């Protein structure tokens, strides 16, 4: 195994595999629908302007048209692979709505016109200091417009702490020093409440721990391959190195998440915020 250090080229280093990500689409989509269910009526009426930041393969972005059939929706993602997977969903709809796709970095995106809804689901954990972007996003909302956010808050769970522990072992440390990232990229619910309230919003913040029941052999390993493991495997281009890492990490996951007669339980904490811009701001 080479001991050459690897440095990612961006905060979203490496490539995304839409197929791997969608292997657990049912469980991954539930927080999105829980978030959307808490969004109040939008000021744009039947034709709201909506942007989904971190739209991924687009399946959830397109579902927004079920609630707002005539909405003008833009899906933004930095991954060319994800946007290619979403292409078949883009275009006009039968009820005068539309879905457009744009490749861009969330960290540099700003609204180009007044928005009724800016939404980001399970993406901001990849953006360091993403809360510094909130003032520009709230300023881009119409009065009564909504900023709706959902972020994983499970960085102290075994699925992540064991990943960090293995990556920090002497034979991996130099090459993976930049691949696991910090563990404090998501704030507490109270911090989101205070920051968004200070921007002139009425804010609803909550957290939920889902108990996902997964099937298969070592299914938690399969789950994290679609997300947290991605930059680690990208930093190990040799398939033999990837397999060696997966065996070390997978053995620990199997012990931390043992199978039960009905499946393997993965507790997964998520943080939500729905901020409505007040008319007097």
Image: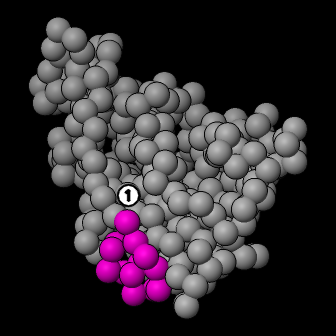
Is 20 situated left or right of 245 in this image? right
- Point out residue 9 in the picture as x, y percentages from the top left corner: 54, 61
In the image, 5 versus 40, the foreground residue is: 40
Is 16 situated left or right of 74 in this image? left
- Point out residue 153 in the picture as x, y percentages from the top left corner: 29, 54
**Residue at the spot 61% in from the left edge and 49% down from the top edge:** 55
The colour scheme used to paint the residues is one colour
- Point out residue 38 in the picture as x, y percentages from the top left corner: 46, 54
In the image, 6 versus 58, the foreground residue is: 58
Total numbered circles: 1
* Residue 251 in which image quadrant: top left
Label 1's element?
A: strand
In the image, 242 versus 202, the foreground residue is: 202
Residue stretch rendered in magenta on the structure? 192-204
* Residue 118 in which image quadrant: bottom right
Give the farthest residue toward the top: 261
**Residue at the spot 17% in from the left edge and 27% down from the top edge:** 257
**Residue at the spot 57% in from the left edge and 28% down from the top edge:** 19
Residue 223 belongs to magenta span: no
**Residue at the spot 72% in from the left edge and 62% down from the top edge:** 45
Determine if residue 41 is in view: yes
The answer to whether 198 is drawn above or below residue 231 in the figure is: below
Report the residue marked by disc 1: 272
Where does the C terminus fall, quadrant-wise? bottom right
Where does the N terminus fall, quadrant-wise? top left
* Residue 52 in which image quadrant: bottom right
Give the farthest residue toward the bottom: 280
Determine if residue 58 is in view: no
Residue neighbourhood size for the residue with mark 1, other residues' Cα within 10 Å, grouped as few (<14), some (14–19), many (≥20): many
- Point out residue 274 in the picture as x, y percentages from the top left corner: 45, 64
Is 259 situated left or right of 149 in this image? left
In the image, 231 versus 136, the foreground residue is: 136
């Amino acid at each position: 195994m080479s001991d050459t250090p690897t440095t990612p080229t961006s905060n979203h280093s490496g490539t995304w595999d839409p197929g791997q990500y969608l292997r657990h689409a049912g469980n991954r989509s539930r927080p999105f629908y829980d978030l959307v269910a808490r969004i109040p009526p939008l000021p744009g009426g039947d034709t709201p302007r909506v942007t989904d930041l971190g739209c991924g393969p687009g399946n959830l972005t397109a579902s927004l048209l079920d609630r707002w059939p005539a909405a003008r929706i833009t899906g933004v993602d930095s991954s060319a692979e994800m946007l290619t997977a979403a292409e078949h969903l883009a275009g006009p709809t039968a009820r005068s709505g539309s879905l457009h796709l744009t490749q861009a970095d969330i960290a540099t995106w700003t609204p180009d016109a007044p928005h009724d809804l800016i939404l980001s689901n399970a993406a901001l954990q990849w953006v360091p200091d993403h809360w510094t972007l909130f003032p520009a996003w709230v300023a881009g909302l119409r009065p009564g417009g909504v900023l709706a956010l959902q972020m994983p808050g499970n960085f102290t769970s075994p699925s992540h702490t064991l990943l960090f522990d293995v990556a920090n072992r002497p034979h991996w440390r130099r090459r993976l020093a930049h691949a696991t990232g910090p563990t404090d990229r998501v704030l507490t619910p109270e911090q989101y409440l205070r920051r968004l309230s200070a921007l002139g919003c009425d804010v609803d913040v909550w957290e939920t721990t889902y108990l996902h029941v997964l099937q298969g052999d070592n299914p938690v390993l399969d789950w994290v391959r679609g997300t947290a493991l991605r930059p680690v495997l990208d930093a190990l281009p040799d398939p033999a190195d990837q397999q060696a890492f997966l065996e070390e990490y997978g053995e620990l996951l199997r012990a931390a998440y043992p199978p039960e007669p009905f499946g393997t339980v993965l507790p997964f904490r998520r943080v939500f915020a729905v901020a409505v811009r007040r008319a007097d701001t």
